[in-house]
Image (cartoon, rainbow, N blue to C red):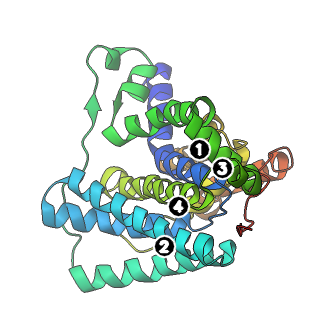
Amino acid sequence: MDLVQMIGSYLASDIRMATPILLAGLGLLLINRAGLLNIGAEGTMLIATLVAVVGSFYLGNVWLGLLCAIVSGALIGALFALLTVTLRANQTVVGAAINVLGSGLSATLYRIIFGVATNNAAIDTFDVLAIPILKDIPIIGEAFFQQKPIVYIAFLLVPIISYYLFRTQSGLNLRSVGENPKVSDTLGINVARTQYLAAIVGSAIIAMGGAFLSTGLLNSFSEEMVSGRGYIALAAVIFGRYKPTGIMAAAMIFMGGNVLANILMVTGSNIPYNFLTMIPYVLTVIALAIFARSAVAPAALGKPYKRG
């Protein structure tokens, strides 16, 4: 394999591995911009990984499995909004509870549905969708135009969400709620409805990231398969300074370390396996240490709003 092919393969792997982080980060961005602090992306993704597999297995279609996962994410988002917006529970505690729920519920339901001692269920999964002509471009052809459909959707969501947040009245209302819900309420913006919609839509996008893990990157479910990606997505939002393009860059940087670790393991590097698997998490910690102070979070993030 020549240098051009190596670079193309590396970029293709990086983009593919970054997709779950990107989707989770974009979902969290919408939630955070509405003033809600949700650390429950890990649990939401775990539940979605299972629901996507179950839906694909019983319905025989991976797109229907993805739809089931999206619905599961939306329901989790609605539950999060109910507890934090309506009941004004501590947002950090609720997010942590969702993570615990996702870990236990996904593992238990998988054993109930498919049994304990069983081979992985055969499911329909996403295939590569190569774009003619463009796929033959050196380096970027394989990286950008020979990917699975969810990868294209994830990266198309970056300009779409950017346009929504910074170029539409609805996006302005969402950001204003996250900055000052009292003033937004005075101006006639329905704060509770805005936060509910942000939590539901954002969690649905997070669930897409989980679904891609089990039906795109892999073809099965395994316990704790999200492996901290929900937490890395939290870091990506901060590293990306609460902007879609920044989150995209952060996801690719963090997962670029993961791809490098995989390459080193395959080539028989003398570096211990445990140290190689630490690379993306070390990059995450370093990035947070450097950029956390310069990232300006929404002013009302994590602060419950009580009308009147």
CA separation, marks 3 and 1? Answer: 19 Å
Q: Nearer the viewer, mark 2 or mark 4?
A: 4
Instruction: Report the front residue among 73 and 286.
Output: 73
Helix, strand or loop for disc 3: helix
In the rendered image, residue 290, in percent from the top left (x then y), is placed at 84, 47
Query: Quick check: 68 above or below 161?
Result: below
CA separation, marks 4 and 1? Answer: 26 Å
Crowdedness near tag 1: few (<14), some (14–19) or many (≥20) residues, C-alpha within 10 Å: many
CA separation, marks 4 and 3? Answer: 12 Å
Task: Give the side of residue 71 with respect to residue 251, left or right.
Answer: left
Task: Give the side of residue 258 with respect to residue 104, left or right.
Answer: right
Counting residues from the start of the chain, the first of labels 3 and 1 encountered is 3
In the rendered image, residue 171, in percent from the top left (x then y), is placed at 59, 40
Q: Nearer the viewer, mark 2 or mark 1?
A: 2
Crowdedness near tag 4: few (<14), some (14–19) or many (≥20) residues, C-alpha within 10 Å: many
Helix, strand or loop for disc 2: helix
Instruction: Report the front residue among 197 and 214.
Output: 197
| Tag 3 and tag 1, C-beta contact below 8 Å | no
Which image quadrant for residue 16? top left
Q: Nearer the viewer, mark 3 or mark 1?
A: 3
CA separation, marks 2 and 3? Answer: 18 Å
Helix, strand or loop for disc 1: helix
Q: Residue at x 69, y 77 (%)?
A: 90
Residue named by callout 3 = 33
Counting residues from the start of the chain, the first of labels 2 and 4 encountered is 2
Residue named by callout 2 = 79
Residue named by callout 1 = 251
In the rendered image, residue 58, in percent from the top left (x then y), is placed at 14, 67
